[in-house]
């Protein structure tokens, strides 16, 4: 059956979905990317997530099959905000809207959500939370990783449930709310994320030079001279180097991590990096 010819047989609007079914789909959408592939991206996970609602809406088996077919088409959006699209699509499916309209709305909603979600979560919430809680973990606190999980997962789940109910009640009018100020909102969130990441680099970048140059009774501490020029100069230099490698040299984050690991190990072996200042004169190894 050609996809362009898909039409529902029963056009009678279905009964509204109950809260149990909506909640079930919210929990299912945690597996959105479990079957991720480069042909249809999140399509399999999308269909798996929305299937309980489709089964309640389409009691006609042929209509259910048609709905499953077009909901298995290409789909890709931010996983934390996917329930926004789910609520809209379910509302249209419930009212037996035209299939091409459902497709168009699905595509129109998933695009802006990707940019908004990246700006809100990957560039803002996750880096800020990771920077704060990682510092707690470095200081030996078990609260660090626990708080990271509670904050990120908590915010994620609150959004998933809220957006599901809100967009399902709003229906197609939710699209207008999404697209009206999507560009401005994404830009503002991106700027906030860059600003906060820069502050975290300065505050939590603990890399310092552990060397000094002998100068009689008053050795010259190199780190102090660098701090006089620009505080946190070393963390800034490493951040910019990583940015250049990823953007211009097409390095992957994994390669950057391995590079920093080598730099850190070799530097500590030769006394270059240290929390305390040491002399340029080689220090003998002790067992």
Image (cartoon, rainbow, N blue to C red):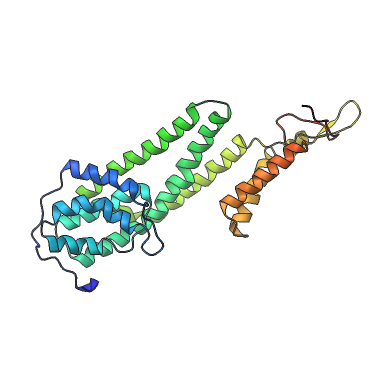
**Quarter holding residue 179:** bottom left
101 or 18, nearer to the observer: 18
Q: Is residue 247 left or right of residue 158?
A: right
Is residue 135 visible in the rendered structure shown here?
Answer: yes
**Quarter holding residue 233:** top right
Q: Is residue 254 left or right of residue 64?
A: right
Which residue appears at 73% of the width and 40% of the height?
267
Is residue 163 visible in the rendered structure shown here?
Answer: no
Which residue appears at 33% of the width and 46% of the height?
30
On the image, the x and y values in percent for residue 34 come to 37, 51
138 or 85, nearer to the observer: 138
Which residue appears at 69% of the width and 41% of the height?
264
Which residue appears at 57% of the width and 38% of the height?
200
Label count reads 0
On the image, the x and y values in percent for residue 230 come to 70, 40
- The N terminus lies in quadrant: bottom left
Q: Is residue 227 left or right of residue 187?
A: right
Where 216 sits versus 21, above or below?
above
- The C terminus lies in quadrant: top right
**Quarter holding residue 201:** top right
């Amino acid at each position: 059956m050609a996809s362009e010819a898909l039409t529902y047989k029963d056009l009678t609007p279905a009964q509204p979905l109950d809260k149990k079914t909506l909640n079930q789909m919210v929990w299912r959408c945690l597996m959105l990317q479990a079957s991720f592939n480069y042909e249809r991206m999140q399509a399999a996970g999308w269909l798996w997530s929305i299937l309980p609602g489709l089964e309640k809406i389409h009691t006609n088996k042929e209509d259910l099959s048609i709905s499953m077919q077009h909901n298995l088409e290409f789909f890709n959006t931010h996983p934390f905000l996917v329930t926004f699209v789910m609520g809209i699509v379910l509302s249209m499916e419930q009212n037996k809207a035209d299939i091409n309209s459902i497709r168009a709305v699905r595509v129109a909603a998933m695009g802006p959500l990707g940019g908004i979600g990246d700006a809100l979560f990957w560039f803002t919430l996750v880096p800020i939370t990771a920077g704060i809680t990682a510092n707690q973990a470095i200081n030996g606190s078990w609260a660090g990783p626990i708080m990271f999980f509670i904050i990120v997962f908590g915010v994620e789940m609150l959004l998933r449930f809220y957006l599901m109910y809100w967009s399902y009640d709003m229906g197609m009018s939710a699209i207008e709310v999404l697209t009206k100020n999507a560009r401005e909102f994404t830009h503002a969130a991106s700027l906030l994320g860059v600003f906060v990441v820069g502050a975290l680099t300065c505050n939590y970048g603990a890399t310092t030079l552990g060397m000094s140059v002998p100068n009689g009774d008053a050795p010259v501490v190199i780190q102090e001279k660098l701090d006089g020029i620009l505080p946190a100069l070393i963390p800034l230099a490493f951040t910019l180097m990583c940015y250049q490698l990823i953007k211009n040299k097409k390095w992957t984050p994994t390669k950057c991590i391995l590079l920093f690991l080598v730099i850190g190990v070799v530097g500590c072996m030769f006394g270059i990096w240290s929390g305390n200042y040491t002399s340029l004169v080689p220090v003998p190894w002790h067992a």
